[in-house]
């Protein structure tokens, strides 16, 4: 298939780009490189011997996007492009709504012009807010406490409206849980700018000595050891989930939400222990107060994706830690020299 990836140079986009190329698809990328580095495509080529066609542009440029869709006779789009820092979204809501909501509207207009009907949208488990029942299934109510989460819910709702008005569309809302890890080569991985917020990149920075100590946000949750529980998913499993979703979507009209998680919850202490055991690196930590907005436990009921897409995450937390460390150790400054 000829597939356009918006944001295809980013963390999840680049791993998905690799998997699509390996699976024989033709890949075109549009990215404004606001949070990524085009060097990633050299790395992808050195892994699989192929590279995508790349355009440096913004998804808000609807005319530019439709030209690319038409020029390459694109059949399907995966829409990764977006801003994703939760705290920043509360400080700069306009920037987040412009980029994430306006960017999506602009892409959808371009797709309409070019008559491209297959779309997989990068959504997030954040749309479940503070879940009442875990594991969470796709029918759980959505809610948000910050502009980032709200931007994902808004785009999901917009996509639902579009499929009511146009029954020729094939749309998947892919709700990612906690993507971590890197390709096993250690050539591509997550390259956060500034201070990361998420657990795994912070553990890596502590393990490599770039940071002294990991702060654990609370050990008094009603969980197995008092620390927060999440559904960590290896980014390569997630990438394969996108390939499966695109295959499935070709025959399915309408809008369909899927959780992409492992279905297994791990606590912060369990992840640290796994990291230390698999990498041999010490991860010193201290317990501090809870982080505002955190929930005790969040993990997926991933049975719908397994049943419908024929996809199931395969890689363990040990493998996530191994690959995360391999990437970090080989690229202490990310893609920057
Ligand atoms: P990322 O920041 O690494 O990748 C996003 C890419 O989009 C970057 O290459 C960036 O330069 C590009 N981009 C941003 N705005 C753009 C625009 N207006 N036009 C063109 N390119 C633009 O993030 P990621 O972790 O790969 O996330 C990809 C998607 O998945 C995002 O939509 C994010 O909200 C969603 N998501 C991520 C996570 C996570 O933990 N990483 C979890 C759930 C959902
Ligand atoms: C965070 C975001 C969520 C977003 C997700 C993926 C918050 C409140 N939520 O979720 O909206 O979709 O990232 O990008 O920011 N932890 C520590 N110390 C740290 C960092 C994290 O103990 O320095 C703990 C957290 O309390 C949590 C777990 O590690 O229990 C995972 O945290 P994180 O990686 O930030 O993911 P989420 O909390 O799931």
Image (tube, helix red, strand yellow):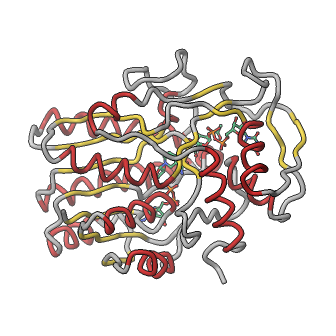
Q: Is residue 207 left or right of residue 335?
A: right
Given residues 136 and 274, the one toward you in this image is 274
Look at 75% across and 52% down and name the residue there.
203
* Residue 233, placed above or below residue 11: above
Residue 210's x, y, as percent?
A: 83, 65
Residue 59's x, y, as percent?
A: 35, 63
Could you say which quadrant of the image residue 223 lies in?
top right
Look at 45% across and 68% down and name the residue there.
9
Quadrant of the snapshot with the C terminus: bottom right
* Residue 261, placed above or below residue 128: below
* Residue 76, placed above or below residue 188: above
Quadrant of the snapshot with the N terminus: bottom left
Q: Is residue 114 left or right of residue 185?
A: left
Residue 256's x, y, as percent?
A: 27, 34
Residue 12's x, y, as percent?
A: 47, 57
Q: Is residue 237 left or right of residue 337?
A: left
Q: Is residue 17 left or right of residue 277?
A: left
Look at 54% across and 27% down and name the residue there.
129
* Residue 236, placed above or below residue 217: below
């Amino acid at each position: 298939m000829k597939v356009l990836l918006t944001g295809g140079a980013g963390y999840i986009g680049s791993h998905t780009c690799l998997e699509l190329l390996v699976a024989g698809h033709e890949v075109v990328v549009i990215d404004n490189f606001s949070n990524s580095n085009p060097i990633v495509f050299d790395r992808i080529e050195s892994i699989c011997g192929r590279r995508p066609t790349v355009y440096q542009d913004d998804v808000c440029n609807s005319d530019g996007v439709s030209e690319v869709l038409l020029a390459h006779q694109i059949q399907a789009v995966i829409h990764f492009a977006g801003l994703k820092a939760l705290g920043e979204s509360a400080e700069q809501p306009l920037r987040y709504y412009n980029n994430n909501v306006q960017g999506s509207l602009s892409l959808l207009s371009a797709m309409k012009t070019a008559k491209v009907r297959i779309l997989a949208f990068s959504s997030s488990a954040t749309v479940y807010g503070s879940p009442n029942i875990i594991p969470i299934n796709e029918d759980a109510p959505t809610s948000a406490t910050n502009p980032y989460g709200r931007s994902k819910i808004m785009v999901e709702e917009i996509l639902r409206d579009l499929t009511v008005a146009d029954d020729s569309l094939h749309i998947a809302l892919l709700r990612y849980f906690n993507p971590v890890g890197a390709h096993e080569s250690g050539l591509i991985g997550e390259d956060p700018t500034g201070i990361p917020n998420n657990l795994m990149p912070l553990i890596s920075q502590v393990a490599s000595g770039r940071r002294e100590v990991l702060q654990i946000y609370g050990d008094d949750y009603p969980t197995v050891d008092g620390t927060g529980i999440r559904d960590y998913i290896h980014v390569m499993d997630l990438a394969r989930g996108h390939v499966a979703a695109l295959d499935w979507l070709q025959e399915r009209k309408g809008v369909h939400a899927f959780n992409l998680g492992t279905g297994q919850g791990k606590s912060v202490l369990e992840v640290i222990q796994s990291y230390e055991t698999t990498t041999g690196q010490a991860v010193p930590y201290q317990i501090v107060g809870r982080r505002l907005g955190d929930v005790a436990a969040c993990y997926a009921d991933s049975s719908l994706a397994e049943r419908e897409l024929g996809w199931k995450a395969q890689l363990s937390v040990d493998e996530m830690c191994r690959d995360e460390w391999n990437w970090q150790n080989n690229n202490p400054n990310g893609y920057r020299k």
